[in-house]
Image (cartoon, grey):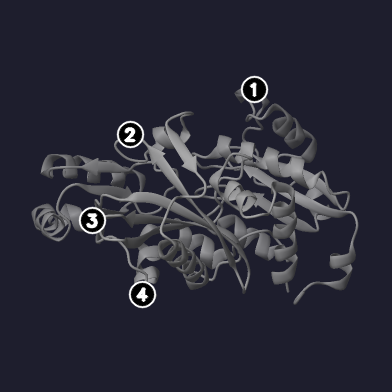
Amino acid sequence: MTGISIDLAAKSPLYVGLLFGGQSGEHDVSITSAKAIASALNQNPRYLVQPFYIQRDGTWRSPDVSKQVLDAGKGLQDSELLTNAAFFLPTEVQQIDLWFPVLHGPNGEDGTVQGLLQLMHKPYVGNGVLASSVGMDKIAMKAIFANAGLPQVKYVALNRWQWQQDEPAWSEHIETTLGYPCFVKPSNLGSSVGISKVRDLTQLKEAIASATSYDPRIIIEQGVVAREIECAVLGNEQPQASAIGEITFTSDFYDYETKYTAGMADLIIPSKLPDNVTQAVQSMAVKAFQTVAGSGLARVDFFYVEATGTVLINEINTFPGFTSLSMYPKLWEYSGIPFAELCDRLVAFALEKHV
């Protein structure tokens, strides 16, 4: 494999630093994902997993405390938190040969932690700084996808200052360009937080006020009647696409409550699609991954407009949920790669890309 240090490639045990928790709204999901990954890695005698829990305030905790969090499957209580601690890294960080960041959302999946790991000059699982930051910012992502010729829903991007300067003109532009219903979203936020479906001008103004309270840059997308389908990508320079999965739900749209409340959404694997649509989705998923300079893994989400046979790319998720029941590992399990082997392959890809 290109770029592997001979010593590191052969080293046993390989000290794997498992980073989880973090400062985003997906803190608890991260713990669940990390617990599943730790269990898988511990099946391989080559790996010695050292967990590092990141509190919601960004404080890193030592492996002994972090293991307690993993075992409990939930974050620390207020009385257990380190408070007023200057930012520091536990001394055990020096032992780590390779990092496995299991972090979702801002300050974890957006290039910030990837930049820190890059400065450590150690291999790490998953996407680098560029792909991670582009994957988290919807405006940048959509601009890059448009440049690559990937079809998308119509959208309007603007910032809080622009809206405040000329609200009537922007309202008219959004209504003329997109119509109703449309979706208002913060540009840089995960977990469907701050997203609103709007059907008239009053709701539009309320939704923009809400979205700009999370992020001064927002995006408004045209609503489409479509099936929500997803494809997993795995690899570095020659990425592979999985089978296609589909999310079904009875709520008005796939919002935060629907996403994280048991029983409100179902995963269907494989999605029943015409062969040509499946192939188009897989091809577009790989192209999207390569367009953002992806590495390791990603889940690419699409809209399939069944009435016209059209496939539209929605977004790329550079570190998707990784619990044993999450779409990404389930797609690969169906495609012939069980969970433990998937984790092993991600470590191998991390070593491969490291120079």
Given residues 302 and 306, the one toward you in this image is 306
* Position above or below: 232 against 193: below
Question: 112 left or right of 280?
Answer: right
Q: Are marks 2 and 3 in contact (CB under 8 Å)?
A: no
- Tell me the element at label 2: loop
Residue at the disc numbered 3: 161
Q: Residue at x 88, y 49 (%)?
A: 45
Query: Whole-Å distance between the Cαs marked 4 and 2?
Result: 32 Å
Q: Callout 2 environment at 10 Å: few (<14), some (14 to 19), or many (20+)?
A: few
Residue designated by label 4: 149
Vertical comparison of 191 with 80: above or below: below
Percent position (x, y) of residue 127? 59, 62
Read off the residue under disc 1. Answer: 79
Distance between the alpha carbons at the discs numbered 1 and 4: 52 Å
| Residue located beneath label 2 in the image | 251
Is residue 273 visible in the rendered image? The answer is yes
Q: Which of marks 4 and 1 precedes in the sequence?
A: 1
What is the three-letter code of the residue carrying label 3? Trp
Quarter of the image containing the C terminus?
bottom right
Name the mark nearer the viewer: 2 or 3.
Answer: 2
Which x, y percent locates residue 142? Answer: 36, 64
